[in-house]
Amino acid sequence: MSRRVLLWIGFALVHALVIWLGFTGDHAASWDVDQLYRWWASRALRGEAVPGITEGWVYPLLAYIPIVLAAAPGTAVDYTLAWGLLVTAADAVAFGVLVGTARSRGRVFAAWFWLAALVALGGVGMFRLDGFTVPLAITGSLWLVGRPWLGSVLLAVATWIKVWPAALLAAAVIALRRRLAVVGGAAVVSALVIAGVLAAGGGAHLFGFVGGQTSRGLQIEAPVSTVYMLLAAGGVPEAQVVYGAEYITFQVTGPAVDGVIAAMTPVLILGMLSLAVLGGFKAWRGAGFASLFPALALALVLGFIVLNKVGSPQYMTWLIAPLVVGLAIDRRRWIGPAALALVTLALTQLIFPFSYDAILVLAPAAVGVLVIRNVLLVALFAWAVVRLARVRVRPRQLSAVP
């Protein structure tokens, strides 16, 4: 049996397993799809309201593409199952691009890693908008060298569904010599989206998802919340877990928490700019795309996670795209962080949905798992930054002196 056939058998089995995981435990991992996405789709299809146009929304407007597509079968297929099948179809296209004829050992290894990552993270990695953007991000990243315009378009579409692929776009603009094609593809997609929203009368809500994120508190799973979770678990009176009804999330409070909340957005911006400057310096010194892009992309994606005051479990899916690209190019150098990422994803699934209730009541063992997961995230971020700093550059040519 060929490697290609084995990979596709693995693909089918893994996606069947992950869809099943989304339906276990009273649909805990797929709750957003089962309740919120289904509701948004029905409101839009009935003409009642379109968040992002007729009212504010926490997501960019193109998030409606998968949300409405999952409702296309109507009552013939349950909406949540239809979502799982939709993500599976998108994954299949990207998987085919990645694997190809299965002659590249790096790409084959990267494909097995992707499947392992899906199992490690479980249902939450599929039953969120993030799950739909991952195959777009992988395909777009793989096409940047040979088809930079098309690769940029895919990354831009993914960004207008969920913001995180903007990190990959930024890395592409910095690392790729044909950066005008990247900028052009992203500009065309953005112009079409903006024009469509303005034509529909939704200009007031066009960038509402940006302000919605900056006004949020410290979500309990975010790395920055680790200290407060330990304080709360230790019984410090001011530290406690509270429910944020506006965003349907649990947040943590504690001493000087308002100052931390206010500081995190500037810290995130400064951190991302610093990484971009470092990447730009490497590109200016002649670093090649194959070594610079994966390192910069992973560093920027992890910056979005580690420096963020929001830390939802589905954010861990963001790690898959840059690691797949890194493994496809240089599997020996990237196998270490890929293994660390798999452990991080597995701990994330243990946290949600399996131990989430225990974390909410501050059970020591459950909080301990959360702390370990966050420490591993920081360690992975440190590896990415060091790897970026060590990207080799070409020696500068000195001009001859007459």
Image (spheres, rainbow, N blue to C red):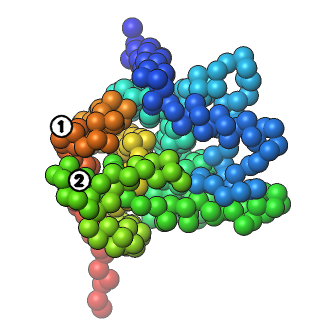
Q: Residue at x 25, y 49 (%)?
A: 374
| Disc 2 secondary structure class | helix
Query: In the drawing, does residue 203 fall left or right of residue 273?
Result: right
Q: Residue at x 26, y 62 (%)?
A: 238
Report whether residue 4 is seen.
no
Residue where numbered disc 1 is placed: 365
- 147, 196: nearer the viewer: 196
Percent position of residue 186, x then y: 62, 58
- 193, 145: nearer the viewer: 193
Q: Is residue 248 above or below residue 306?
A: above
Q: Quadrant of the N terminus?
A: top left
Percent position of residue 372, x then y: 19, 44
Q: Quadrant of residue 349?
A: top left
Q: Is residue 115 above or below residue 61?
A: above
Q: Mark 2 belongs to which amino acid?
A: Ala
| Disc 1 secondary structure class | helix
Residue where numbered disc 2 is placed: 232
